[in-house]
Amino acid sequence: MVKANIKGPKSLSAFFTFYTLYPVLGTFIAGSLMLFLVGRPVVALNIATTNWLNELCGRNAVILGAILGAMVSFDFGGPVNKAGYAFCIGSMANGNYMPYAAFASVKMVSAFTATASTMLFPKYYLEEEIEVGKSTWILGLAGITEGAIPMMIEDPFRVIPSFVAGSAVTGAIVAFFKLGLNVPGAGIVSMLVLEPHIAGIWLGAAIIETIISTVVLTMLKRAKYRDENKKMQFEIEKRLEKAL
């Protein structure tokens, strides 16, 4: 936007573009918008979300775990995910280790689901999605949710609800068994700081989520696949009628 509306002499184009005017003005404008226009509502929303989550602690721990699980997989590292992370870190500082245990367990599963669904039911996916799915499980081991973003971008209205459904179950399981994780981190490495029986339940919750999310996603994808085939068949029949 700055470059399109402010022009300088050609002899100084490189100077304007890379060193002074455009970067400085662009950063100033974007920073001002974030600070004065976007930043305040976002901060207020995060504070309200944190207060609400704090109210769910204690007797509503299972509900809290389910909500945190859903937040992790809602936007794959976006603002909702980050709000959940900030709450979990704050809870950890106050001696409540369950929220982060739920958060860390769920962090693995979107990537696992991307791999499982594309490998088991490839006909419902594009070739590009299948290629991505072959390696996202590695990111899942490191607790990186962003590996599933390409799949989400291609079909958000089926992918996001599927991941959220499984994630909520996993968060609830972790809360129900009162598991705790007192070291920031995610993925399979977190198991190293857990006692063996706790690590088994924690990993089992993640596997259950993967199964649930894969089943739900496959059902939604299958319905889409059938609808597209019916539509294609109808168009072919219509063209044949016109040709005759």
Image (spheres, rainbow, N blue to C red):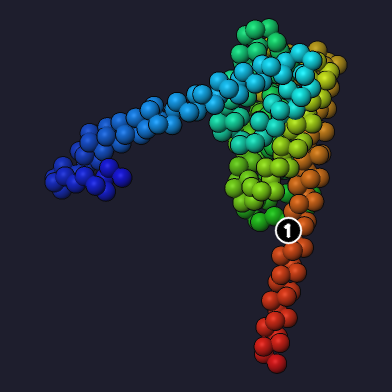
Q: Going 69% across and 45% down the picture, which residue do you hit?
A: 159
Q: Quick one: quadrant of the N terminus?
A: top left
Q: Going 70% across and 81% down the picture, which residue do you hit?
A: 238
User: Where residue 147 appears, x then y in whole percent?
Assistant: 62, 39
User: Where residue 45 appears, x then y in whole percent?
Assistant: 54, 26
Q: Quadrant of residue 29?
A: top left
Q: Is residue 28 left or right of residue 137?
A: left
Label 1 packing within 10 angstroms: few (<14), some (14-19), many (20+):
some
In front here: 118 or 105?
A: 105
The residue furthest bottom is: 244
**Residue 159 in view:** yes
Q: Against 29, is 242 above or below?
A: below
Q: How many marks?
A: 1
Q: Quadrant of residue 103?
A: top right
User: Where residue 131 appears, x then y in whole percent?
Assistant: 65, 49
Amino acid marked by disc 1:
Lys
Q: Against 153, is 99 above or below?
A: above
**Residue 199 in view:** no
Q: Going 77% across and 63% down the picture, which residue do you hit?
A: 226
In front here: 48 or 148?
A: 48
Q: Is residue 178 left or right of residue 77?
A: right
Q: Against 151, is 241 above or below?
A: below
Q: Is residue 63 left or right of residue 131?
A: right
Q: Is residue 48 left or right of residue 99?
A: left
User: Where residue 128 appears, x then y in whole percent?
Assistant: 62, 53
What residue sits right under mark 1 in the picture? 224
Q: Against 182, is 115 above or below?
A: below
Q: Quadrant of residue 37?
A: top left
Q: Going 27% across and 48% down the picture, which residue do you hit?
A: 4
The residue furthest top is: 95
